[in-house]
Image (spheres, rainbow, N blue to C red):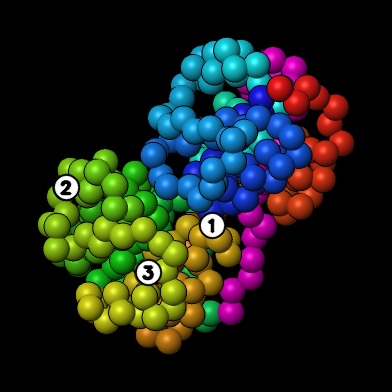
Amino acid sequence: MILLLGGTSHTAEVAERIATLGYAVLVSTATEIELATGSHPSIRRRSGRLQYDELVTLIRDNGVVAVIDVTHPFATIVRENARKAAEELTIPYLTFIRPRLDYDCDKIHWADDHEGAAKLAFSFGRPVLTTTGSKVLEPYAWWSRETGTPLIARVLDYGPSISACREAGLDTSLVIARRGPFSVDDNLEQIKQYDIGVIVTKESGKAGGVGEKVEAAKEAGCELIVVRSPVDKGAGLFETIDGLINEFKKLEMSRA
């Protein structure tokens, strides 16, 4: 059994490629997000967040012989726990990290964390659109209240995400609950609808839709705040899916 930790747009592709090699695959995601893994008989799903001890138990109980991690670049705790669990149980650990990209935009501003990003975003005095998820809303909501500048949050159409917006004090009229991907036109439509002047995003690479946000920001004249992705220097890291799969093929493991 191969444990695939997922939730990003790469999850289905990796699951199918591993299953095609003759391995049973258990795909684990934090939420019940839809994944187009088809009906491959060797792929099964589980969902729900795992603490470290629960992850170790899952690996042991399912006879997992390798862990493949394609979680979000900002899922640092998940990645740390997965790498540690694999080391403890002496099984291989491979992870895909989206490569950093360069963006041609003269209104792009970088921040090391959400606290810094929120302070910077609301310094322009223009309505702010966050596309960074519901878990990190607190500093943005605080600065919105402090400055009296509107905050619009784009989050997943998922119950806990919408509840987090409510808890942060956002009116439902200021919440865009939709699942991506979002095209340049989608972004422009939302910018126009809410008179957005500042967009906040995470450095989540091509698959995270950053390129489309950059183009929309340029066309609409918006300031763009980008929160830098964490640096992962651990073992088993690959910047391409092909590189990860090729390394996986070199491993000698049971196909059960």
Q: Earlier in the sequence, mark 3 or mark 2?
A: 2
Three-letter amino acid code at disc 1? Ser
Residue for point 84% across, 31% down: 251
What is the distance, in whole Å, between disc 3 and disc 1 at their CAs? Answer: 14 Å
Nearest the camera: 83 or 136? 83
Give how far across and how far down residue 143 sits, in percent.
25, 57
Q: Are marks 1 and 2 in contact (CB under 8 Å)?
A: no
Three-letter amino acid code at disc 3? Ile
Query: Which quarter of the image is occupied by the C terminus?
Result: top right
What is the distance, in whole Å, between disc 1 and disc 2 at their CAs? Answer: 25 Å
Nearest the camera: 78 or 18? 18
Q: Judge left or right: residue 201 versus residue 104.
A: left
Three-letter amino acid code at disc 2? Arg
Q: Which mark is residue 103?
A: none
What is the distance, in whole Å, between disc 3 and disc 2 at their CAs? Answer: 20 Å
Q: Badge 3 is on which residue?
A: 199
Asked whether residue 165 appears in the rendered view, the answer is yes
Give how far across and how far down residue 54 sits, in percent.
49, 17
Nearest the camera: 140 or 7? 7
Q: Is residue 12 above or below residue 44?
A: below
Residue for point 44% across, 64% down: 181
Residue for point 16% across, 47% down: 166
Residue for point 52% across, 81% down: 106
Nearest the camera: 86 or 136? 86
Q: Badge 1 is on which residue?
A: 204
Q: Earlier in the sequence, mark 1 or mark 2?
A: 2
Q: Badge 2 is on which residue?
A: 166
Nearer to us: label 3 or label 2: 2
The secondary element bearing badge 2 is classed as helix
Q: Which residues are magenta?
A: 84-104
Label 2 packing within 10 angstroms: few (<14), some (14-19), many (20+)? some
